[in-house]
Amino acid sequence: MYFVSSQIIRSLTSYLASQGLNKEHLLNNITQGGQQLNNSRYKYPLADYEQLMAIGAKHLNRNTVGLEFGQALNAQNWGLLGHIALVSDSLLSALQHALKLHTLVRNIGTISLHHHPQHSSLEWHPKTPVTHFMADELFSSWLAFAQQCCEWQAPLMLSQIKLMRPQPPINEVKQYQSVFNCPIEFNSTTNSMIFDSQLLHCPLKGANNELETLLAAQAINYNHEAQYISQLKALITQHLPERLSVQQAAQALALSTRSLQRYLKQQHTSYSKIIDEICKQQALILLKQGLSSLNIATALGFSEQSAFQRAFKRWYCITPKKYLTEK
């Protein structure tokens, strides 16, 4: 399942709200109504990111919202990976960490760094069809990071940007040129940022080798293990009202069923408990949105309305109707 970190979704909703969009409306369009925004371990489905970008582009009447959002991001918005990048000793070191750990932030594509005699290129290839917003965000945020964190006094210049997105209208092309300040090729076969190789050796302002080593070790452990529950919750939620079996969920996470069950046991939970927890959270969100018990039961995959009502009373010690009256 393709996901985006809660830090990115939280930053995106905050950015769009700062541009005049209604934050409550934005939250109503993402998984669990934004209840997991402050959970740094939670992963949102790619569809939530795409939905927020589409809403932003429509409301603001411009398709450069990904570009603008990337400029507004800072390294802290990347979570643990961002903190590692900030204490790295050079751009090359920061990029090497990103190559290993970028799935802490999202698993939508692959990042690669290529070296040539006169230049280097940083490329991002999506593994699933996505709109242009994500590549725009990634490249503009990477550039913003380099500009903000490099010790060099001279302006950081790019050689060329290549984007797979179609050629935009001339007014949008000007905005791309304003951000990247270099030749831009649209309709390319790759998303690529090309620059002088010497930039890789640019020292960073916050370099701290001891902290970099400590955080990198922590990130590797987290990247291998702790992300599974967040991915699992996002996967289950995305497929509702269908109730995925544990076998289907394990396959989606590229695990064996036994490995997933063993992992959940180590985390002091189980597959059925996670489904129950998700339904409990979603039921409250849908109830507050004004849906009837019948519609909520259908949306959450209950066999009948009475089964949902029994579950709700078990969760909250009160019926849905009384909950609305008393709350």
Image: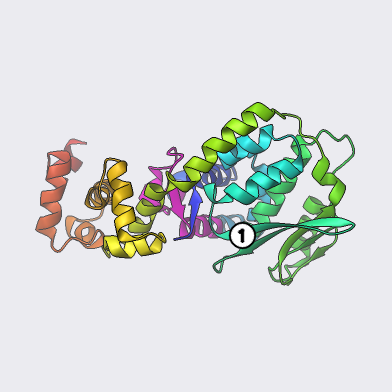
Q: Is residue 173 placed above or below 106 in the rendered structure?
A: below
Q: Is residue 265 magenta?
A: no
Structure colour scheme: rainbow
Return the x and y of residue 155 as percentages of the image width and height. Answer: 87, 41
Q: Residue at x 48, y 41 (%)?
A: 222
At mark 1, the secondary structure is strand
Query: Magenta stretch containing residue 34, yes or no?
Result: yes
Q: Position of residue 270 (x, y in %)?
A: 25, 48
Q: Quadrant of the C terminus?
A: top left
Left-right relation of 65 to 317? right
Q: Residues within 10 Å of mark 1 (few under 14, many from 20)?
A: some
Spot occupied by residue 202 in the image (x, y as percentages of width and height): 82, 39
Quarter occupied by residue 210: top right
Check disc 1 and report the residue beneath it: 110
Extent of the magenta region: 26-54
Left or right: where 11 falls relative to 29: right
The quarter holding residue 121 reads: bottom right
Q: Is residue 258 visible?
A: yes
- Measured as percent of width and height from the top left, residue 83 is found at 61, 35
Quarter of the image holding residue 120?
A: bottom right
Please name the residue shown 28% across and 52% down the image: 261
The kind of residue tagged 1 is: Thr
Q: How many marks?
A: 1
Seen in the image, is 307 located left or right of residue 244?
A: left
Q: Is residue 224 or residue 129 the one in the foreground? A: 224
Residue at image coords 44%, 61%: 1
Residue 285 appearing in the image:
no
* Left or right relative to 109: residue 255: left
Residue located at (19% from left, 59% from top):
297
Q: Nearer the viewer, residue 55 or 204?
A: 204
In front of the other: 141 or 323? 141
